[in-house]
Amino acid sequence: MRTTLTIDDDLFAELRRRSQAVHGGLKEVVNETLRRGLSVGATPLPAQPPFKVKAKSCGFLPGVDLLKLNQLADQLEVDDFIAAHRRGGAAP
């Protein structure tokens, strides 16, 4: 079948390079590339083993409440904001 397509310059350059590398025609390279691209996903991928995350010690000292670390970061940010405004500067 004959048709007209508009192909981006970078894609055309790559197709031209491939056709020269295999000493074939541009038509054959375009058709083969389209066939390969359309066949992706046609068959399901093989099942992969489940991804598992291994726990690792973070090295926090006993007594540090990990659930309050965000609260500490927020408080430090507020303290920096107040200090910057007292100096007359802009907030970081």
Image (cartoon, helix red, strand yellow):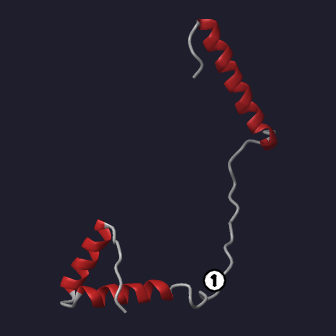
Is the residue marked by circle 1 packed among few (<14), some (14-19), or many (20+) residues within 10 Å?
few
| Amino acid type of the residue that numbered disc 1 sits on in the rendered structure | Gln
Residue 78 position in % (x across, y down): 71, 22
Q: Residue at x 64, y 20 (%)?
A: 80
Residue 59 position in % (x across, y down): 68, 47
* Quarter placement of the C terminus: top right
Q: Residue at x 64, y 7 (%)?
A: 86
Q: Residue at x 74, y 37 (%)?
A: 70
Q: Quarter of the image holding residue 50?
A: bottom right
Q: Quarter of the image holding residue 8?
A: bottom left
* Quarter placement of the N terminus: bottom left
Q: Is 7 placed above or below 81 here?
A: below
Answer with left or right where residue 63 lies relative to residue 76.
right
Picture mark count: 1
Residue beneath disc 1: 48
Residue 77 position in % (x across, y down): 67, 26
Answer with left or right where residue 47 lies relative to residue 34.
right
Residue 38 position in % (x across, y down): 48, 85
Q: Residue at x 28, y 88 (%)?
A: 27
Q: Is 63 placed above or below 43 here?
A: above
**Camera-side residue: 85 or 44?**
44
Does dot 1 land on a helix, a strand or a loop? loop
Q: Quarter of the image holding residue 42?
A: bottom right
Q: Is 46 placed above or below 64 here?
A: below
**Camera-side residue: 21 or 57?**
21
**Camera-side residue: 66 or 20?**
20
**Camera-side residue: 25 or 67?**
25
